[in-house]
Amino acid sequence: MRLMQPEPAAALLGLRAMKTVASVSGTPGKSQLALMEAARRVLLHIDADIATLPPVTPAELAAGFPSADLRLQFVNGLLILALADGVPSRETVARVEAFAEALGITTPELTNLRRLAEQHMTLFKLDLLRRSQVGDIMKDQLKQHGVVALAKSILGMRGLIEDPELAARYRAWARLPDGTLGRSMFEYFQRNKFGMPGERFGFPEAGLYHDFCHVLGGYGTDPQGELQVASFTAGFKQTRPFYLILFAVLIFSAGVNARPTADGYTTIGVLGEPGAAERMFAAIERGALVNTDLSDKWDYWPLVEQPIDEVRRQLNIVHAV
């Protein structure tokens, strides 16, 4: 997933459309303003005073957006904008849908945004989960490790059972030398008090790439760090990458628990925190440089004994800006 930079005229139209959506219910929210300003500086590279921008109609926007790929990227951006300060109103969703229709874009994400705004939470969550990385992880767990392992991983994730043999294989990373990938991973799990695969509340092995991205990317586990990891992963993920960003924004900026479990920490407005939106864009670009889709059945075992900096070099994980 790479971010495309539109021509200046299209960029200005897009920024006007973003403000039009953000202004449906009155003054744009703090996170919406921060997101628009970050997009203006980091992605669009235009000089414009967002406060004085006039609205734009869907037809005007469509006339200035000739590229199909750019149209999809822009509609995805409107989805994030709509969710930046909480669950959007039906009127805001309607305006997003109007722009999407004019651009000829129809996606399941738009349907789910409507379901969320209308409080059809069961349908919203079921469809989101099956299309998101959560669904991919469960499918890969089944393909890679079989039915029994999938069942064990689900029960283990809920804290109902443990798999001592599997857990021992991962705990052995504690005996690796300092500075190796495996030792760094073990320290990450210990520091954050997370369960390793096989332990109670541990994540399925097929989803461990998420934690590897925290360690390899140097991202924290606070809301901003989670948003950056999702964006970084979206950069290299080949299948439905946008869902990763959407998932994180739902949890940490819209305050919606999109996880498969009933409990879970959520926040509202992380995109309004200083620098958060800029770091989201930077993480996408950084992830796009990675030469391997770590989410696609990546075999990390040959790398865990290697120095972490050497693994970063092999995967082309560049230093964060």
Image (cartoon, helix red, strand yellow):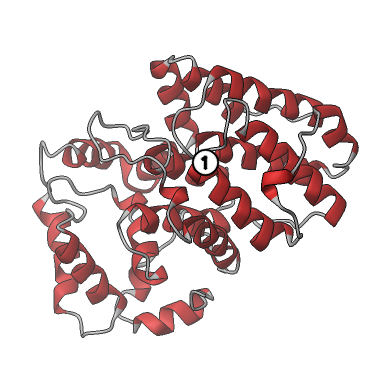
Which residue occupies the foreground of this view, 21 or 195? Answer: 21
Near-viewer residue (18 or 177):
18
**Residue 148, percent from left and from top:** 24, 38
Is residue 241 visible to the viewer in this orientation of the structure? Answer: no
Taking the spot 45% from the left edge, 42% from the top edge, the residue there is 249
Q: Nearer the viewer, residue 109 or 274?
A: 274
Q: Is residue 12 left or right of residue 94?
A: right
Instruction: Please provide percent x and percent y for residue 286.
Output: 55, 67
Left or right: 211 as drawn, with respect to 245: left
Q: Is residue 60 left or right of residue 69?
A: right
Identify the residue position indicated by label 1 in the image. Answer: 243
Q: Nearer the viewer, residue 100 or 128?
A: 100
Q: In the displayed structure, would residue 306 be above or below residue 258?
A: below
Q: Position of residue 67 (x, y in %)?
A: 84, 45
Q: Quadrant of residue 157?
A: top left
Please name the residue shown 80% across and 54% down the image: 6
Q: Residue 211, how many percent across, how many down? A: 33, 59
Say which quarter of the image contains residue 219. Answer: bottom left
Furthest toward the front, the residue is 52
SS at badge 1? helix
User: How many discs mark residues in the rendered view?
Assistant: 1
- Determine whether 100 is above or below 44 in the image: above
Callout 1, which amino acid?
Answer: Tyr
The reply, left or right, for residue 126 in relation to residue 26 is left
Q: Quadrant of the N terminus?
A: bottom right
Q: Residue at x 45, y 28 (%)?
A: 87
